[in-house]
Image (tube, rainbow, N blue to C red):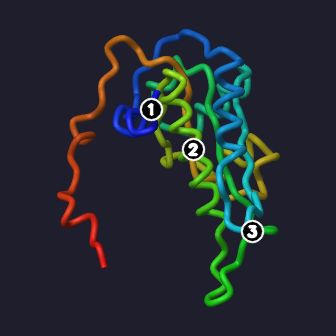
Amino acid sequence: MEFFDVVKNRYSCRKFSSKPVENEKLDKILEAGRLAPTAKNAQPVKIWAVKSPEALKKIKSVTPFAWLKEVPVILAVGGTTENAFLRPSDNRNFEDVDATIVATHLMLAIEDAGLGSTWIGFFDVPKTKELFPEMKDYDLVALLPVGYKADDAQPSDRHDKRKPKDEFIKIL
């Protein structure tokens, strides 16, 4: 798929089929995340692919979304301040920016693979870290469900609402 088609066609999918995601597709998606740029290439990011029935049950318990029941994979993305780029002028740590870039690459790769996803930011982070101790030292920025879109899946009515170019873009 052409890049602009991926960007244009991607929407927040909240209705999935129960069809499993092939390992080859998941590997390609994860590689897109691994190859994402980070500030000074510090790579202070981790991706967790939650696939086992036990782990999926736990990760689904940290969100209020019943529509996740059919999702076969959920990717958790987090960054750590350790070794992340610090901007010299104000000491701003870029771990959250880097994790967000990685998550965005993952979402676009998911669409490119013919699958659906959405960005879940509404989840219980402390409970997630309790259930998954390997995540405890990370700033968790997103959960990304990964699966085949249900035949009747549709974007929300807000999907096509965009600010006009002159409000969104300013050329200096």
Q: Is residue 140 above or below residue 156?
A: below
Hey, what amino acid is under mark 2?
Answer: His
Nearest the eye: 63 or 88: 88
Q: CA distance from mark 1 to mark 3?
A: 32 Å
Residue at 38% across, 33% down: 5
Q: Secondary structure beneath disc 2? A: helix
Q: CA distance from mark 2 to mark 1?
A: 15 Å
Q: Residue 84 got which mark?
A: 3
- Callout 3–callout 2 Cβ contact below 8 Å: no
How far across and how far down the image is residue 139, in percent? 67, 59
Disc on the earlier residue, 1 or 3: 1
Disc on the earlier residue, 3 or 2: 3
Hey, what amino acid is under mark 3?
Answer: Ala
77 with respect to 111 (left or right): right
Q: Which residue is mark 1?
A: 2
- Which numbered mark, 3 or 2, is in the foreground of this view? 2
Pointer 3 local density, CA inside 10 Å: few below 14, some 14–19, many at least 20: many
Q: Secondary structure beneath disc 3? A: loop
Disc on the earlier residue, 2 or 1: 1
How far across and how far down the image is residue 68, in percent? 50, 26
Q: Quadrant of the C terminus?
A: bottom left
Residue at 27% across, 34% down: 156
Q: CA distance from mark 3 to mark 2?
A: 19 Å
Residue at 75% across, 68% down: 84
Q: Residue 105 got which mark?
A: 2
Which of the 4 quarters of the picture holds residue 20?
top right
Q: Is residue 87 above or below residue 136?
A: below
